[in-house]
Amino acid sequence: MSTSALTITDLTVRLGDLQILRGVDLEVPFGEVHALMGPNGSGKSTLCHALMGKPGYEAAGSARVDGAELLGLPVDERARLGLFEGFQYPVEVPGVALRELLDEMAAVGGSEISDRGAASAARLDMERFLDRPVNAGLSGGEKKRSEMLQLGALAPRVAILDEIDSGLDIDAVRDVAEAVEGMRGPDLGVLVITHYSRILRYLTVDRVHVMVAGRIVASGSSELAEDLEASGYDALVGEHDAGSEAVVSESFLDGL
Amino acid sequence: MPSPAEEDWRYVAVPGSLSNLQIPRSPGADPTRSTYESLLGETTGRADIVDGHVSGVAGSNIAQLAESDVSWYEPAAPVDRFAAAASAFGGSGVVVSADAGEIVSQPLFVSIEAATPGVVSIPRLLVVGAEASAVDVVVEQRSPDGFESLVLPDVEVVAGRAARVSVTVVQNWGDQTTAVGRHRLRADGGASVGFAEAGLGARFSRLHLTVDLVGRGADARISGTYFGDADQTLDYRYFMNHLGPNTTSEMFLKGAVAGAARSVFTGLIRVDPDGQGTNAHQTNRNLVLSDSAEAHSVPNLEILANDVRCGHGSAVGPLDEEQRYYLMSRGLPAPRADRLQVLGFFEESLQRFPNQKLEPMLRAAAMAKYDRVAS
Ligand SMILES: Nc1ncnc2c1ncn2[C@@H]1O[C@H](COP(=O)(O)OP(=O)(O)OP(=O)(O)O)[C@@H](O)[C@H]1O
Ligand SMILES: [Mg+2]
């Protein structure tokens, strides 16, 4: 069997004394786009940071990109193995123009990055942002588009986009969704973290996963997202708190 | 309570002793070639000051101080022994001037060198922009590494009504030079003065800058970038006096310290009772790149008018972890991510320098220092 783009097995993550992820299993095959949903504080961004290797996140279990283990590697090596994190809150880098960052990325990862960055800037109508500092002084929506531009430049194997649609106007959500859709291909797996099913109107997702309290408690087709939008997480959270999440997961899916 | 004079020297101590140093009668060497002058392209005029003596003046809008009519120019009363030495022993220098309405299109370049071991020099620069004129001056200060010298640079800038006058100083003193500079800027109504300093060299450098915004609507843009390593001390004491109504100012200094270096920034925005409508801001951010380096940042406000907008921001700290993580997530190894962060850190202040032609070289000089301490 061929390897998946992203394979997460029994991943637990602690941040200091805080156990945030409690055994996550998740697989995104190449060519697919998955969505990850879940209430605030359930651990979605923690999953992103732990996969990317942010200092302070103690991870155990396994997380592989195209078969290569990520855990234990420095952040930049994970990136070069093909993992991309689109940040929920992109970090401002004052005084460094986006163009300079793209040049540095190309110096490390190859000149194709420059070419793809330029193409990506044109496609996203972001050329005027190339000479502005990375994320500094950008609106929320512009920051998200800058993340998409860098994603296009790096052409990773796995893209995890943390709330790439939050703070975007309706047209921008469609643009971002179409950009993700445009990248879909046999060499990429995408995990889109979102609170809203509206992005899923423009983006065909192959599967939706729901995280509650540090675990994936349900997985299903894209209708799962719409059902959640209608009913909220309460039902899931309540049942999950009862402590039988494995059963919850199945019974929830049975009800769909 | 320390006396004001003691307070003035609270954070720093000057190395060496003044008494062993001599004031030379003539320049001890020919001027050396500057690395910065060529960046400026065409210049309107230039001058060389070596060991406190003018050894050459060329072009227009520039003359020897001794030969020009500056009878109205009264040096400020000395406030410490260095200022007293400067006023007692004079020193020679140059005057850059622009007549009323004259727009001097190319910059003037003034090279100031300390070429002889064991000497005190007092180079002077006076820049006078008459009403509605515009003039830009670039100063490079340098001395060889390895021998002691004391330099007391004295710079006075006067911008007449609606004039635009800017001065950029590249401080590139050698590693055993002590420099105590005293600079005064004055802007009349509607005038704009710009001043920037790149603090790269010297064992000990203090720059005492006073800006008087005298006339209605006068404006000052003050920027600075500094990088101390080894046992360097870089000490800035900046005083922004809003004396006239609707005056505006920005001070923006960013610096890094590594090795056992220390930096001090003491900034005071003072708004006179007549300074209604003042808009003033000062920013000083410091990167501390080693455990034994120190940076002090002391911003102060003294506001005697009621209709003003004043703000200050000050920071001292190590490289930012979030930026490092973000940049590494784009595939940059940690050393590369940090270097890019440092580049951006300096860039924010270098972009504010009045003469942007110097920017690539100043950026390279700061980063060369960073590369030495990072490896
Ligand atoms: N640096 C931190 N220090 C302490 N607690 C943290 C830290 N980062 C995250 N947490 C906690 O970990 C839990 C998971 O946070 P996380 O950011 O992963 O949630 P999320 O699912 O992304 O939420 P949201 O939908 O609001 O973005 C939360 O309870 C949060 O408060
Ligand atoms: Mg989150």
Image (spheres, coloured by chain):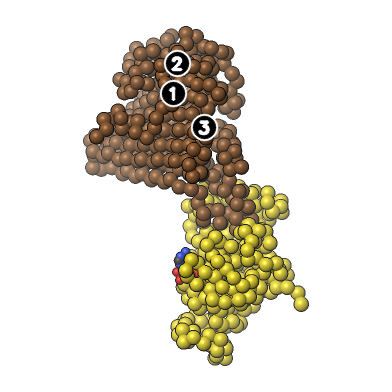
Of residues B154 and B24, the one drawn nearer to the viewer in this rendering: B24
Asked if labels 3 and 2 share a chain, the reply is yes
Is residue A171 positioned above or below A105 on the image?
below
Q: Quadrant of residue A190?
A: bottom right
Disc 3 packing (10 Å; few <14; some 14–19; many ≥20): many
Is residue A41 positioned above or below B80 on the image?
below
Q: Which residue is mark 1?
A: B16
Residue A217 image label: none
Q: What amino acid is found at the position of numbered circle 1 in the picture?
A: Gly
At 56% from the left and 13% from the top, the residue drawn is B29
- Return the x and y of residue B354 as percentages of the image width and height: 48, 33
Residue B200 image label: 3
CA distance separating discs 1 and 2: 10 Å
Of residues B97 and A221, the one drawn nearer to the viewer in this rendering: A221
3 and 2 marks in contact (CB < 8 Å) = no
Task: Establish whether ligand 1 lies closer than 8 Å to the Cβ of label 1.
Answer: no
Among numbered discs 3 and 2, the one appearing first in the sequence: 2
Instruction: Name the quarter where the C terminus of chain B is drawn.
Output: top right
1 and 2 marks in contact (CB < 8 Å) = yes
Q: Which residue is mark 2?
A: B21
CA distance separating discs 3 and 2: 24 Å
Q: What amino acid is found at the position of numbered circle 2 in the picture?
A: Leu
Q: Chain B is shown in which shade?
A: brown
- Return the x and y of residue B145 as percentages of the image width and height: 56, 24
Q: Is residue B50 left or right of residue B312?
A: right
Q: Quadrant of residue B16?
A: top left
Is residue B153 positioned above or below A28 on the image?
above
